[in-house]
Image (cartoon, rainbow, N blue to C red):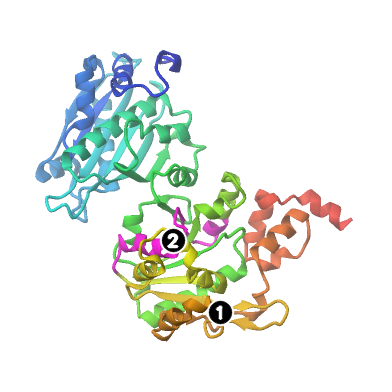
Amino acid sequence: MAVTILGDKDFEKVPPLKNKVLRVNLNNNIYGTFAEIGAGQETVRHFFRAGGASGTIAKAMSAYDKDFSDAIYGVEDDGRYVTEKRLKKMLSHEMKLIEDRISRYKQPDKIFFTYANTVATIDFAKKYKGHGWVGIRFQISPEGEFNEIILHVRFHENDARLQQLTLGTLGVNLIYGAFYKHDNPKNLLRYLYDHIDQDQIEIDTINFSGPQFEHVDNRLMSLQLVKNGMTEAVMFDAKGNNILPAALLYKKNVLALRGSFRPVTKVNMDMFEKAYKMFVEANRVNEKKTEAIFEITLSNLRAEGDIDEEDFMARARLLGSLGQTVMISNFKEYYRVVEYFSNYTKERMGLVMGVNNLIDIFDTSYYRHLSGGILEAFGKLFFKDLKVFLYPMKDPKTGEYTTSDNLKVHPRMKELYKFFKLNGKVLDIENYDPAITDIFSREVLRMISDGESGWEDMLPEGVSELIKSRNLFGYQASALLEADK
């Protein structure tokens, strides 16, 4: 049976929180449970106070004590409670109880949901501001399969009570969005911040799943998080799954390569592979505890104007086909990348870059917004045992290579550059492949769009086939056939 849901015209564009709650409570078909751990029962409190909750709330609980929580949801292998795995256990357990205890024969029109969160708010010493996992499992029709929206939040407020209130508001927005905005996940994402300032809470990971979201690519949802200012960086693995940055980077050595990867070329992979080997050998790091990150900045994605989502997905798919982890960030400066990684790991770090990128780092104009200027930026960039692995640049006219030994920075920056060079902060990638140093992404892109041949040999194995099969970057087989004629 179809569920009658009030139309948007019956409510404000951004309705007051109480109106959102009432819209859920007054729908006779919506029925479910609330399970909130670690920050009180702030979400369900809104539903109780608004009125009409008796037909909506099957159960509200908070297994705050760890022993009780373990007795209900089981013991985690790592002994942790604020994890995605724990949240999924909560959603599965509570939904099973609803299905076991509520007769479909007696309640044929009910659409079930379970909302859950597991959260650690700011500690007493105010050293760790806290974080948590929030999720909902829900139906949109009585006969329908279940859908899920799971997200990770980081708190920025300095008071536990304020964090709890913010979490309660977020929970209401999520439940409301699940039932009334599920047909437009991008809008649903933005509405999560209704009545919340972006400096109160950060959403750094979100995943949509289930039949309602089968056409949703979570990488695009990650892009929206950065684009909307909800977080500064997101990560996803080679399979396109969004990854919690803190979980991936925790106590790991990190090697990062920034680029446009439009498309990824043999030069990009040569830079990465040679630098990775140097990073592991020079720093004597454990490869099993080392993460390689291919980073694309938002400013790079906006290089051609507004962000082209198809173009972004083309880059992501190609990097994924090569087995790489991708990070999308809002960091223009390299020191901010290092600061970001430092939030999650104290282990060794490395940056892979070309000559032009290193020269730009010594450009003072990039640091005018800092009170300490370039010295402040360099203090943040090199305060740890960070290494820059420099890939040489070939002069197309003379055939000579620019390396760390002969590159030219601004005269006022010479001594500063020498300091870092002599202290082993900048290392040349010496065993590069000279046969490919003439390859540039922009030239490959031009050849693809103009229907020229020969670009395939400039890309890593398998990449050209993927571009052709999916018609990426403007590739058109018909254009090539015309060129052959």
Left or right of 474? Residue 171 is left
Left or right of 375? Residue 42 is left
Q: Helix, strand, or loop for circle 2?
A: loop
Q: Disc 2 marks which amino acid? A: Arg
Left or right of 77? Residue 305 is right
Q: Residues within 10 Å of mark 1 (few under 14, many from 20)?
A: some
- Residue at which label 1 appears: 408
Q: Earlier in the sequence, mark 1 or mark 2?
A: 2
- 158 in relation to 282, above or below: above
Measured as percent of width and height from the top left, residue 9 is found at: 45, 14
Residue in front for this viewpoint, 74 or 280: 280
Q: Which residues are magenta?
A: 318-346
Which residue: 43% across, 29% down? 182
Q: Residue furthest right?
A: 485
Observer able to see residue 293: no
Measured as percent of width and height from the top left, residue 5 is found at: 40, 16
For residue 368, the mark is: 2
Quarter where residue 282 is shown: bottom left
Quarter where residue 480 is shown: bottom right
Q: Which image quarter is the N terminus in?
A: top left
Q: Helix, strand, or loop for circle 1?
A: loop
Q: Which image quarter is the C terminus in?
A: bottom right
- 335 in relation to 7, above or below: below
Quarter where residue 86 is shown: top left
| CA–CA distance in space, label 1 to label 2 | 21 Å
Which residue: 59% across, 62% down? 264
- 172 in relation to 468, above or below: above
Q: How many marks?
A: 2
- Taking the magenta stretch, the answer to whether it contains residue 319 is yes
Q: Disc 1 marks which amino acid? A: Lys
